[in-house]
Image: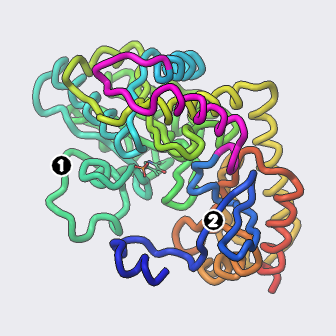
């Protein structure tokens, strides 16, 4: 930790735990102390730690080729592309290395679609207040939270913020300068706020009528996290562009932007690219994730575990719990107090939780977490909430 402070940019607020290894939904520190991992990174290690099938896929790929440039073909990214397109019922996919980069691709595609079809001036993208879309300059602009906007201006122009689930405000913001909307079906960093089905349908209706592109940012809520491949599916809507990352690679860095029949040809040769995007290792890992997600009953299990956690927390009857929000295994427990100390105490007691804002405990456990592990984690939470 001292070396870290000496040599590494101090841009992260870390907990004083050195994670040495992981197995399933448990991680271990240098002294061998065990922790139940209710974070899976930040929704990344979707199949848990040291998953045998992931290791096998990576070893196999590693022994063939670790990197090829995008000047050549390779079967690893093609196999993943086929699987992801078929499962999502979208038309084409672009691979990046992260969520922010997937969103950059979506933003570029939306602007180009509009400028080719309608000419200049139709470039605004409506995003939501409390949203999070990444840390690059454009995705920071897209992020509707002031706390990320200090000190870094001038920002990429062309983003307008609307309040989640407020259809009247949305209508008032739509004009001839708007080319797209970008939103999370369940807001993650902003505090675990799910989008209402009627709102989603009304927004998509308005957008379809006006040829405004609908982009769903599924970086956090996608990849099975909410009990469906993508969380927007639970709202009965169909986007023109979908972005994802986090849980897609089970720990390997990968992002993806998916395009439908309307947007699949917008970005052409030379319009966009990435040196590492679609690399053989990350795509080999992601293929294993998609195979697991498509196995019989996988999503039902995610939903059942989410309900189990929710019911158990309700049964604590803790006066500190204000509201439980979320879908599947993406859960936010809003308290009447700040959660900082509870999260610290949970770590001391061998459980890792996330927060989402000052008063929300966020849970994004591995999708394969076992009931026994959930029980262990919630026993600790219970003692802290009833203390
Ligand atoms: C984490 C996140 C991003 C950014 O992803 P990175 O891989 O960190 O660039 C974008 N959108 C949402 C909804 C996220 O949760």
Say which element carries label 1: loop
Q: Foreground residue, 252 or 227?
A: 252
**Does the segment drawn in magenta span residue 57?**
yes
Q: Which mark is residue 157?
A: 1
C-alpha gap between disc 1 and disc 2: 42 Å
| Residue 346 coordinates in the image, percent (x, y) | 72, 76
Question: Could you tell me which residue is drawn at 52 percent across and 51 percent down?
Answer: 187
Q: Can residue 325 be seen in this view?
A: no
Magenta-highlighted stretch: main secondary structure? loop
Is 288 left, or right, of 127 in this rendering?
right
**Residue in the image at 65% along x and 37% along y:** 54
Q: Which mark is residue 76?
A: none
Say which element carries label 2.
strand
Instruction: Determine which residue is flagged by label 2.
Output: 20
- Confirm whether the magenta stretch covers residue 8: no
Residue lying furthest bottom in this view?
Answer: 387
Q: How crowded is mark 1: few (under 14 residues within 10 Å), some or many (20 or more)?
A: few
In which image quadrant can residue 304 be found? top right
């Amino acid at each position: 930790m001292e070396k870290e402070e000496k040599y590494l940019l101090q841009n992260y607020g870390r907990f004083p735990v050195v994670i040495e290894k992981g197995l399933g939904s448990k991680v271990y520190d240098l002294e061998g102390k065990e922790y139940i991992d209710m974070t899976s990174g930040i929704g990344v290690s979707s199949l848990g730690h040291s998953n045998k099938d992931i290791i096998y896929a990576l070893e196999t790929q590693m022994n063939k080729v670790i990197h090829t440039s995008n000047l050549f073909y390779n079967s690893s990214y093609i196999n993943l592309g086929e699987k992801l397109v078929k499962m999502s019922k979208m038309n084409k996919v672009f691979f990046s290395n992260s969520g922010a980069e997937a969103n950059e691709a979506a933003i570029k595609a939306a602007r180009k679609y509009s400028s080719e079809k309608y000419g200049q001036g139709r470039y605004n993208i409506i995003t939501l207040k409390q949203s999070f879309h990444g840390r690059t300059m454009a995705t920071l602009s897209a992020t509707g939270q002031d706390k990320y906007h200090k000190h870094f201006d001038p920002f990429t122009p062309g983003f307008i913020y609307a309040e989640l689930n407020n259809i009247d405000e949305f209508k008032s913001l739509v004009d001839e300068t708007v080319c797209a909307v970008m939103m999370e079906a369940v807001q993650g960093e902003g505090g675990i706020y799910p989008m209402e089905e009627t709102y989603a349908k009304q927004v998509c209706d308005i957008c379809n009528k006006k040829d405004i592109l609908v982009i769903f940012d599924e970086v956090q809520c996608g990849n099975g996290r909410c009990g469906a491949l993508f969380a927007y599916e639970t709202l009965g809507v169909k986007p023109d562009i979908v972005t994802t990352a986090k849980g897609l690679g089970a720990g390997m860095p990968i992002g993806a932007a998916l395009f439908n029949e309307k947007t699949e040809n917008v970005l052409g040769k030379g319009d966009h690219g990435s040196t590492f995007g679609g690399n053989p290792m990350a795509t080999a890992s992601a293929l294993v994730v998609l195979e697991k997600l498509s196995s019989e009953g996988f999503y039902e299990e995610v939903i059942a575990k989410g309900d189990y956690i929710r019911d158990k927390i309700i049964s604590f009857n803790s006066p500190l719990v204000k509201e439980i929000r979320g879908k599947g295994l993406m859960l936010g427990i809003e308290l009447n107090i700040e959660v900082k100390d509870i999260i610290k105490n949970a770590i001391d007691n061998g459980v890792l939780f996330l927060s989402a804002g000052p008063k929300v405990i966020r849970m994004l456990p591995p999708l394969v977490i076992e009931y026994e592990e959930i029980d262990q984690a919630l026993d600790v939470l219970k003692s802290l909430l009833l203390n």
